Image: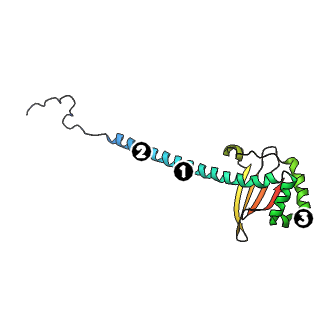
Amino acid sequence: MPAMEPPKAGLPGPGARRGASFGAKVSLGCGLLLLAFLVTCGSFTWLANRQAEAAADRGWAQLHAPFDRIRDEAGAAALFRESPGLQAKFGSEAAFLAAAASWRPGLRTLPGPRPRLRDLLGRDGSNFRIRTEAVKGRPRTWIRYAPPGGASFTAEFEEGKVVDLEVR
């Protein structure tokens, strides 16, 4: 039997495996799966955050209009005249103006730009809420803002018009 020569430097010997070991392949596959999972979760989180920010922006802008208008007598009167829902609830402009005047001391000012989502929602997520549902076949949206230390302000909208206001 001929004597075996020792393998030359850099070349595998007889019976040596070529390529990565099974364990290395499994580790690489698991690493790639973990990377794909993290990228997917990150993408969904980013998308959900963008949608929440966009909804909060729309709600904040929509809430600002009636909130700013009830801060003074002329704005409250104009809001009442434009809003058949308020007319139905309060009956007369004088009754609405009296209610608006009673709300003013408890209302804090709304910041012009929307606060960061985390600050807007508060610790338990209850400071700012938007809800839309069908009422008599028409979409109706409620937007509520309850700043810490201030009165809660809820505006109800149907077809872009204010149909109800509530301040507590």
Q: Position of residue 39 (x, y in %)?
A: 49, 46
Q: Which residue is mark 3?
A: 92
At a point 20% along the width and 28% down the height, the residue shown is 9
Question: Dot 3 lies on which element?
Answer: loop
Q: Label 2: how many residues lie within 10 Å, few (<14), some (14-19) or many (20+)?
A: few
Q: Give the residue type at disc 2.
A: Leu
Please tell me which residue is depicted at 84% across the width and 61% down the height of the picture.
Answer: 80
Residue 143, above or below 150 = below
Residue depicted at 20% across the width and 38% down the height = 15
Pick the residue in front: 62 or 9.
62
The alpha-carbon separation of the residues under discs 1 and 3 comes to: 49 Å
Label 1, on which residue?
A: 44
Could you tell me residue 88's position as x and y percent?
84, 67
Residue occupied by mark 2:
32
The amino acid on which the numbered mark 3 sits, given as a three-letter code, is: Ser
Eye-nearest disc, 1 or 3:
3
